[in-house]
Amino acid sequence: MSAITTLNPKAESARQAQALAINISAARGLAEMLKTNLGPKGTMKMLVSGAGDIKITKDGNTLLHEMQVQHPTAALIARAATAQDDITGDGTTSIVLLIGELLKQADLYIAEGLHPRIVSEGFELAKKEALQILDKCKIPITTDRETLVQIARTSLRTKLSTENADILTDIVVDAILALYEQGKPVDLNMVEIMEMQHRTEADSRLVRGIVLDHGGRHPSMPKALKNAFILTCNVSLEYEKTEVNAGFFYKNAEERDRLVASERKFIDDRVQKIVELKRKVCSGADKDKSFVVINQKGVDPFSLDVLAKDGILALRRAKRRNMERITLACGGEAMNSVENLTKDCLGFAEDVYEHVLGEEKFTFIEGCKNPKSVTVLLKGSTKYILNQLKDALRDGLRSVTNALEDGCVVPGGGAYEIVAHQALTQYKEQVKGRARLGVQAFAEALLIIPKAIAQNAGHDQQETIVKLQHEYATSKTPVGIDIATGEAMEPKSLGILDNYRVKKQLIHSSTSIATNLILVDEILRAGLSSLRPGGQ
């Protein structure tokens, strides 16, 4: 009987073999569920919420976030997998599979009497060796477009159908190359993702500029402008009450009119300064150019009227994050005052036009000279498709950014796992004592990734692994699975490339969690469930 029951008779406990069995069954249950999602030929899962909303996805991160995982061990693994996504943007399904398989392989030896501590020591040795093997498998890359397209395609094809993945691949690479500067981190917040439930996925495109989700607020304002100067400002162009409570006494109607006029003059002077700037810059050689005002604060109807008469397109209440993006895309500065406005404060775009979709208005600002902020315009006929595209797009952007920041990639299609299995099997001979069994278990567990890819593509997993191992043994070149034929192929020549940091994080996280779980020899449920007197 557990010692805890002496201290707390209501405590529940599971000891040694039973505790290990609970942890292993939870990990394997979660792994079995996600196993069919892995790889380009993985299947979909349909999630139905309590309110009846449906989500169809194969993205491991989305599934683990949205599912209500009740089992404490499974919840622990799910949290570790979603942390992997937060850090690297990919590898959630792989980490769940690898933890499940590490525990399954460990269980084979523990069932024969090997102590879990010996297995965990073997895992640690194997992890260090596996990371050294990963460094040997690295393929250095440059910022040439073709390599980045291959990286994005490898990531996106595991999330979407081939056609949709290929549409997004070019969008993702062009978006990252627009933002990328040598030696500086890429800020993915500068890629705005705008959804339009309209037409089909093939109409999705990259806008080298900004798309705002609102339009002009005056019927007389122009709907489309060419070669526009853009003033980005955060200035109130509407009558506001003073922050201090003030009282005015007037004796007759003339005095009241003077009071109203002087209050109005304060705003009119601001508007007039913007109009004067427009007349100044759109004159002489630039007389064919137009003028746009994008304001973070409000613009009242009187001000809109004055601006419309001068052919100025004014957008009010722009989002704060867009203010930063507009100056990065079009140039110029965001102004907090209308004093000292000059031509240098203005940005420039070749095309500014309004697009109306149902009751929604969108303003496109395109044709920027050297945009450091871009917009990905996703189109799809249903909300499901848009959500799927959005999730995949985020992963694609992260994969290209990771590759640029790492400066290298590793061969995909299960190639690294085959190389690591072979190398660990040889390394096992150098390990003294029973810890070599832990190294053997780790090596076998790594094969779950190519096995799952082969099985999901409809091939026999054992036959495929044997072919790959034989091919690697004879050629000494990393080989992965050709999902169309089930034969061995060289990932580097076919452009199937994985992120280095995803694999590195995968090995680190899965080993530490699997080690912790096999070392659990007692599970206790003895917490205070209620602080009220008489609580259970």
Image (spheres, grey):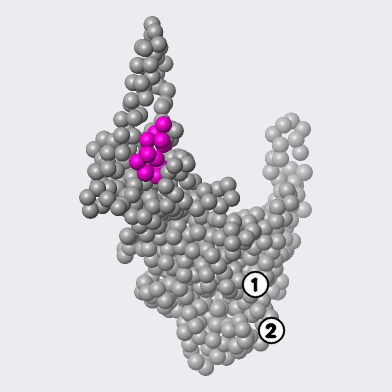
Residue 106: mark in rendering? none
The residue positioned 42% from the left and 47% from the top of the image is 222
Image coordinates for residue 514, horizontal then vertical, percent = 60, 64
Tell me the quarter of the image containing the C terminus: top right
Q: How many C-alpha atoms fall within 10 Å of the one at disc 1: few (<14), some, or many (≥20)?
A: many
Residue 13 shown in magenta: no
Residue 267 location, quadrant = top left
Residue annotated with mark 2: 460
Disc 1 or disc 2, which is closer to the eye?
1
Residue 316 in the image: above or below residue 326: above
Q: Would residue 304 be counted in the magenta stretch? A: yes
Q: Residue visible at 26% across and 35% down? A: 339
- Image height check: is 405 above or below 313? below
Q: Position of residue 294 (x, y in %)?
A: 39, 44
Q: Is residue 119 in view?
A: no
* Residue to which mark 1 is pinned: 42
Boundaries of the magenta span: 302-315
Task: Classify mark 2: residues with Cα within 10 Å, few (<14), some (14-19) or many (20+).
Answer: few
The three-letter code of the residue at mark 2 reads Asp
For residue 370, what is the image quadrant? bottom left
- Residue under the point 36% across and 12% down: 255
Task: Give amino acid for label 1.
Answer: Gly
| Chain-order first, disc 1 or disc 2 | 1
x, y percentage for residue 285? 23, 53
At 57% from the left edge and 73% from the top edge, which residue is drawn? 163
Secondary structure under badge 2?
loop
